[in-house]
Image (tube, rainbow, N blue to C red):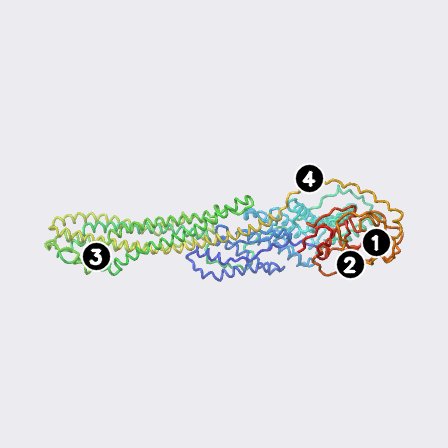
């Protein structure tokens, strides 16, 4: 009886995954070397190809390939999200129950979603498990165990899919992935698993009470599966034999439950109940035979029940005489639900290894990026505060002409500190280096703006195309709108646009600062010209060793110490390491989520708290030192002799001091700006590539949808033709007049014509105008001549009349057979010939001529060419001009 059903598998098409995945890794995981993943990407592509090819093998080794691909899909879900707005890879799958037709095409669905790929893959895994279960030897113990295992695992997969397919694939699915379909398959697989246990119990000759309960539970499962299979929404989906097999087995296992329960009654000496149950079992098995037809063989079980019934009735009639109870008084049989849906294992394979184990999950990576941004903000705030205070201190010292004023006592030489600064400027490129950096900035900016503008243009064009098609096809255009799908991409574009706008403002500040200090930087770039550029002043040697100058020198040393200390603090801040990967991974494994804010705040405070305290103390010390510098410098200025040349010299020295500070600041800003633009260019190129891939994938998806829409429109059934109104209904033709009565002379045999018919199968009709001739009786003549009537109806019986009763004394004319070759002038070539005449088929565009009493079909004994006034047939070759008395056809 074992005839199990195998679920057909979904068909899928090859896709190229390495390219999109490589691009996403390069864009999203910039800290990783893409070369490290080349082999993993190739293996992943190869694994999917093996999954497609191995799906045809009904063996457990094929299941291992499908298991590995499924486990790999699950492993990359958190790392490489394949979706419409992330990694666009369109997976195309065909309906497993698709009854493909020539005109209807294939029922397929293509979605860029790893969840859709996983759902279809799980469906195929369960289908392959059902096929493996079907192929087992159900007469062996191992075969039944394997069959039960496969069907229970398939039931577990279909249960999971029926509960989660709507959330995994909200876009809609093919009919084989609807909730009703998956529920029916789950019940069917569970019934097959229970049947395997029933067969094993029967083979192992277990107690009849246990076997009866197993069979009764199997019957109930088949009943549930049959009800689900017959649902209106899906009943046309199944192969023709599924419902008949299910219905037959439902009745058969109910019969087997009654049979084994009857054996229990026999053991308990309840012979009347035994007979009642066997009678019921016989009726159920007969119903199983009727329902199952030729799909399942129930003859062995039927014979077994019949033998048991005959034996029980014989013993009861002759020995026990027990009363046979009615069927309604029989106790219900218990149930033993042994088959259970096995949940999906994780991982499904036994030796799974993640190909992308080096990559962290995307939410961990995003948490790390957020933490890195916060760390960068802390570093920038601390370093920025140090630099800001240092610049403030330098500007105050430059305005006081310190320390140059306490070094310039000769009045003609360049102060040592200024000469040292000029040499530094010259060694670092001087004004030429700054000018080159200033020239490169606009070019870098223009390049980045062009890349970003091109990416935004592609997005706008794609959205315009989508909106136009959505307006054209209305609700048939079912894909996700571009305006919704591109929200994160446009947000990223807006972020880059804001970055460029801020960079433009910063470039303006840098240009203004360069213009303000250009003259001083030029002087510092050429130390040999500094002495000539400084005006001479009278010496003030008396102040060289004064207490005021000594105090100023001490304060200048403290200023230099603060600068050196700040350089060390800044270096320490920048070199601090703060790796949160292990902590984020542990939090994800423990809680299933990452509280990045609290974890990052605690770690950043632990690492950067002491350094921030050092920055604050340095700023407080600077404030105290600068107050003392301003106080002592005022005393120094009062003690120093002042004249016009000294004031001019001091002014230029201040400008040179400010120029040096400006050079240092400009050089740092421009180099950082150049690096910023170069780094931004790489990011924008990756962004442009992502936009290009997105637009290309949307274009491919658009073309596929257009083909499907065109196919559906072409195959759409048109509305039925409306009934014509009554006044347009065709009228009945007038009644045909009775045939004329022939005169007595016409009853004699017709005389032959004076000339014999030509040897050719065709003779031209007589020329002349198409006028009707008077009816003539056939003249007598030699027997070799046959009459050829010139008017229809003048010879032979009319249409519908009986043929001549007397035999003709003349030999019957037999027309020559039509030529078998191709005749381009014969429109009837290839049609069935009847009596030497082509059948009458109306020719579109052929001239129609009035018929004067002519019959609609060739008459008995008529010659094989059209008669004057009779039905006209196209000739078999181009006629000669004037050959026919009616208008000639235009031959080409």
Tell whether label 2 touches label 4 (CB within 8 Å). Answer: no
The residue that disc 4 covers is 724
Read off the residue under disc 1: 787
Q: Which residue is mark 2?
A: 761
* Mark 3 in CB contact with mark 2 (< 8 angstroms): no
Determine the residue positioned at 79% across, 41% down: 735
Q: CA distance from mark 3 to mark 2?
A: 121 Å
Q: How many marks?
A: 4
For this view, does 579 lie left or right of residue 235? Answer: left
Q: For residue 809, which quarter of the picture?
A: bottom right
Badge 1: residue crowd in 10 Å (few <14, some 14–19, many ≥20): some
The one of 251 and 605 positioned closer to us in this rendering? 251
Q: Is residue 679 visible?
A: yes
Q: Nearer the viewer, mark 3 or mark 2?
A: 2
Residue at left offset 73%, top offset 43%? 331
Mark 2 or mark 4, which is nearer the start of the sequence? 4
Q: Tell me the residue that label 3 is attached to.
A: 523
Q: Is residue 598 left or right of residue 661?
A: right
Secondary-structure class at tag 3: helix
Mark in front: 4 vs 2: 2
Q: Quadrant of the C terminus?
A: bottom right
> CB atoms at circles 1 and 3 under 8 Å apart?
no
- Asked if labels 3 and 4 touch by Cβ distance under 8 angstroms, the answer is no
Q: Alpha carbon of mark 4 to alpha carbon of mark 2: how far?
A: 47 Å
Measure the alpha-carbon separation of dots 2 and 1: 16 Å
| Spot occupied by residue 776 in the image (x, y as percentages of width and height) | 84, 49
- Of the numbered discs 4 and 1, the one sitting upstream in the chain is 4
Work out how far the residue at label 1 is from the one at label 3, CA to CA, in angstroms: 135 Å
> Tag 3 or tag 1, which sits nearer the N-term?
3
Disc 4 crowd rating (10 Å Cα; few below 14, some 14-19, many 20+) is: few
Name the element at disc 4. loop
């Amino acid at each position: 009886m074992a005839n199990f059903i195998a679920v057909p598998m979904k068909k899928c098409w090859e896709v190229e995954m390495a390219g999109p995945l490589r691009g996403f890794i390069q864009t999203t995981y910039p800290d990783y070397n893409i070369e490290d993943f080349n082999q993993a990407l190739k293996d992943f592509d190869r694994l999917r190809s093996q999954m497609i090819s191995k799906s045809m093998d009904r063996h457990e080794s094929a299941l291992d390939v499908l298991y590995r691909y499924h486990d790999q899909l699950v492993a990359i879900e958190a790392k490489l999200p394949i979706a419409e707005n992330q990694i666009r890879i369109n997976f195309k799958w065909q309906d497993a129950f698709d009854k493909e037709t020539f005109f209807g095409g294939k029922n397929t669905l293509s979605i860029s979603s790893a969840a859709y790929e996983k759902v279809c893959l799980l469906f195929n895994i369960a289908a392959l498990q059902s096929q493996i279960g079907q192929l087992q030897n159900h007469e062996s113990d191992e075969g039944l165990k394997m069959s039960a295992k496969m069907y229970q695992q398939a039931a577990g997969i279909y249960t999971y899919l029926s509960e989660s397919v709507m959330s995994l694939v909200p876009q809609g699915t093919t009919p084989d992935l609807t909730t009703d379909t998956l529920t029916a398959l789950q019940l069917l697989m569970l019934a097959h698993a229970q049947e395997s246990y029933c067969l094993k119990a029967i083979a192992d000759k277990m107690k009849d009470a246990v076997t009866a309960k197993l069979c009764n539970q199997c019957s109930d499962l088949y009943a549930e599966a049959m009800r689900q299979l017959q649902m209106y929404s899906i009943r046309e989906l199944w192969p023709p034999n599924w419902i008949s097999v299910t219905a037959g087995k439902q009745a058969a296992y109910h019969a087997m439950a009654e049979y084994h329960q009857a054996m229990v009654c026999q053991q308990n000496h309840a012979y009347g109940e035994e007979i009642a149950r066997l009678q019921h079992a016989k009726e159920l098995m007969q119903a199983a035979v009727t329902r199952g037809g030729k799909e399942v063989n129930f003859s062995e079980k039927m014979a077994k029940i019949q033998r048991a019934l005959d034996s029980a009735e014989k013993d009861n009639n002759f020995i026990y005489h027990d009363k046979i109870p009615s069927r309604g008084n029989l106790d219900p049989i218990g149930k033993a639900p042994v088959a259970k849906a096995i949940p999906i294992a994780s991982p499904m394979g036994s030796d799974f290894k993640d190909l992308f184990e080096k990559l962290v999950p995307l939410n961990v990576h995003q948490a790390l990026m957020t933490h890195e941004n916060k760390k960068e903000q802390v570093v920038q705030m601390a370093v920025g505060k140090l630099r800001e205070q240092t610049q403030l201190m330098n500007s105050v010292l430059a305005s006081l002409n310190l320390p140059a004023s306490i070094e310039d006592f000769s009045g003609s030489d360049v102060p040592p500190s200024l000469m040292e600064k000029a040499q530094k400027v010259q060694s670092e490129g001087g004004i030429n280096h700054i000018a080159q950096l200033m020239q490169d900035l606009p070019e870098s900016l223009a390049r980045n703006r062009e890349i970003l503008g091109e990416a935004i243009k592609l997005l706008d064009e794609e959205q315009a195309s989508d909106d136009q098609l959505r307006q054209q096809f209305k609700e048939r255009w079912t894909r996700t709108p571009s305006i919704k799908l591109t929200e994160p991409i446009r947000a990223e574009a807006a972020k880059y646009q804001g970055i460029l706008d801020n960079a433009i403002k910063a470039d303006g500040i840098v240009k203004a600062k360069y213009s303000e200090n250009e003259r001083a930087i030029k002087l510092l770039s050429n130390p040999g010209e500094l002495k000539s550029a400084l005006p001479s002043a009278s010496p003030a040697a008396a102040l060289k060793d004064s207490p005021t100058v000594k105090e100023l020198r001490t304060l200048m040393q403290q200023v230099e110490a603060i600068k050196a200390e700040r350089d060390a603090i800044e270096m320490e801040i920048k070199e601090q390491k703060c790796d949160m990967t292990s902590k984020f991974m542990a939090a994800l494994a423990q809680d299933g989520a990452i509280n990045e804010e609290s974890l990052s705040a605690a770690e950043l405070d632990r690492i950067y708290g002491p350094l921030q305290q050092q920055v604050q103390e340095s700023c407080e010390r600077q404030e105290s030192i600068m107050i003392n510098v301003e106080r002592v410098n005022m005393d120094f200025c009062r003690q120093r002799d002042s004249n016009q040349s000294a004031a001019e010299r001091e002014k230029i020295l201040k400008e040179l001091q400010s120029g040096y500070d400006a050079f240092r600041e400009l050089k740092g800003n421009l180099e950082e700006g150049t690096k910023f633009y170069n780094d931004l260019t790489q990011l924008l190129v990756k962004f442009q590539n992502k936009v290009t891939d997105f637009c290309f994938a949307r274009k491919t998806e658009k073309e596929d949808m257009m083909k499907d829409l065109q196919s559906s429109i072409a195959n759409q059934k048109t509305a039925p033709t409306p009934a014509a109104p009554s006044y347009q209904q065709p009228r009945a033709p007038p009644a045909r007049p009775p045939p004329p009565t022939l005169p007595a002379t016409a009853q004699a045999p017709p005389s032959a014509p004076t000339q014999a018919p030509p040897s050719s199968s065709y003779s031209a009709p007589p020329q002349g105008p198409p006028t009707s001739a008077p009816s003539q009786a056939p003249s007598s003549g030699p027997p070799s001549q046959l009459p050829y009537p010139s008017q229809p109806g003048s010879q032979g019986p009319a249409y519908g009349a009986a043929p001549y009763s007397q035999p003709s004394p003349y030999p019957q004319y037999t027309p020559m057979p039509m030529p078998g070759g191709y005749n381009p002038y014969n429109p009837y070539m290839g049609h069935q010939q009847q009596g030497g005449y082509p059948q009458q088929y109306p020719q579109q565009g052929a001239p129609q001529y009035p018929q004067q009493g002519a019959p609609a079909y060739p008459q008995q004994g008529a010659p094989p060419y059209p008669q004057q006034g009779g039905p006209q047939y196209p000739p078999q070759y181009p006629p000669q001009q004037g050959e026919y008395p009616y208008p000639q056809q235009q031959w080409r």
